Image (cartoon, grey):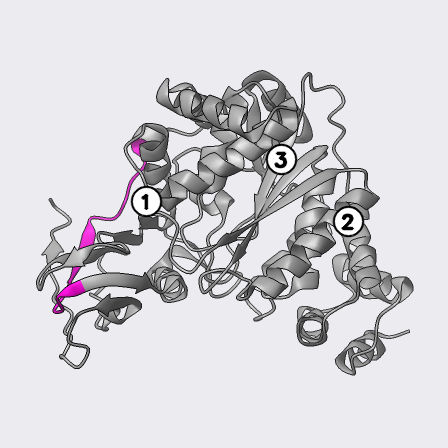
Amino acid sequence: MSIVDVINKKRLGFALNNEELKYAFNNFMKGNITDYQMSALLMAICINGMNDEEIYYLTDIFIKSGDILDLEKITGITVDKHSTGGVGDKTTLVIASIVAASGLKVPKMSGRGLGHTGGTIDKLESIPGFKTELTKEEFLNQVEEVGFAITSQTANLAPLDKKIYALRDVTGTVESIPLIASSIMSKKIASGAKNIVIDVKVGKGALLKNKEDAIRLSGIMRKIGARYKRNVETMITYMDIPLGTSIGNALEIKEVINILCEKEENYLVELSKALASKMIAMGKGISVLEASKEVNELIHNRSAYNKFLEMIKRQGGNIDKLEVSTNIQEIHSTKKGHIIDMDAYEFGKLSLELGGGRITKEDKIDPSVGIVLNKKIGDDVEIGDVICTLYLKKGASFIDRDITTFYKFENSNTNSDVKVMEESKSEKK
């Protein structure tokens, strides 16, 4: 057997057996297969797909590449959550705080950004001092004592997926149902929770662009869960517009704080409440309606916010030192009208361009950059209104591009010339 034979077989559209998948992926883990060879195999999988058996095999290979956390020593019921990723998606941080405040235990292993979508670990690393790599003992102790912990994939938990994950991010092989399913479920199984809620994003700003793919992914992840005796439920949610009002790592942490302090009211808030309610209902064996009432109270009485701060402090973070860029560019509208749509994908690419994500594996993220959406769907806009604000790298030049095309206006002159009007605020201010 050779890696070229395996690549060619998948390139021609044939199914790979368990031995062929083990040979390719385990040898890549050992360093016997190069990045460019694995990239070719991933692209063949991305183009030709995998059947259910291939996905089961690959998931099992990822799981067996490392340890599986034993959560039996944790008192209480464990519930986990995952999102397939979207622009501005910071639901994990909101939801885990709420669910942990309810008394359930949330052992959360999260990933970094993929392509134009952000990652929970990248967001948390924008908090000075925050430790995202916990040992097994640190992770389990914190879940037991605080109620939740969020860690990146450690060296011993699905390490093969971690290596593949980084390669997919920079080789155009992110949007593949088999690779998404194997990556998510290997992490979920390895991190040990018995009850798992998965938010499957679909739309322009998501990895999956159509509902049919979202339904297929949901089904295969539930089947994988059943094979490992995990209770898996999915929610298909839409991602045509950015989630919330901020895109970018430190900016999104600030938005999480605002949500937990009841200073925001939008679709992101409602989605977070719905997912938290589903997790609490699953964990406590109560109705979603009962769980929803509990969620609202946990936010209102600041229990969820205090739990979030407790987690940050326990993992070494200093939320008071969170910084966003002071090199600001305001984008003004030269159109008058009613906003009826926003392109999440374009905003995600713009955030990546500003430095909020990675184009190569070696790229360093600037946590201070990003975008604040000053206008949203349903808002009326006058000429000169600030529709969004860009937070640029220190010393970076303004973006010279027509960003207002990311919005769709109703009752506006679509033939009018649109110019980007720029205003800056001195870094000294």
Residue at image coords 83%, 77%: 14
Q: Could you tell me residue 261's position as x and y percent?
A: 32, 27
Q: Earlier in the sequence, mark 3 or mark 2?
A: 3
Q: Is residue 13 above or below residue 140?
A: below
The amino acid type of the residue labelled 2 equals Ile
Q: Is residue 161 above or below residue 131?
A: below
SS class of the residue under badge 3?
strand
Q: Which mark is residue 251?
A: 1
- Residue 329 appears in view: no
Q: Which mark is residue 80?
A: 3
The amino acid type of the residue labelled 1 equals Leu
The amino acid type of the residue labelled 3 equals Asp
SS class of the residue under badge 1?
helix
In the picture, measured across the screen, residue 195 lies left or right of residue 375, that is right
In the picture, measured across the screen, residue 314 lies left or right of residue 67, that is left
Q: Which mark is residue 224?
A: 2
Q: Residues within 10 Å of mark 2 (few under 14, many from 20)?
A: many
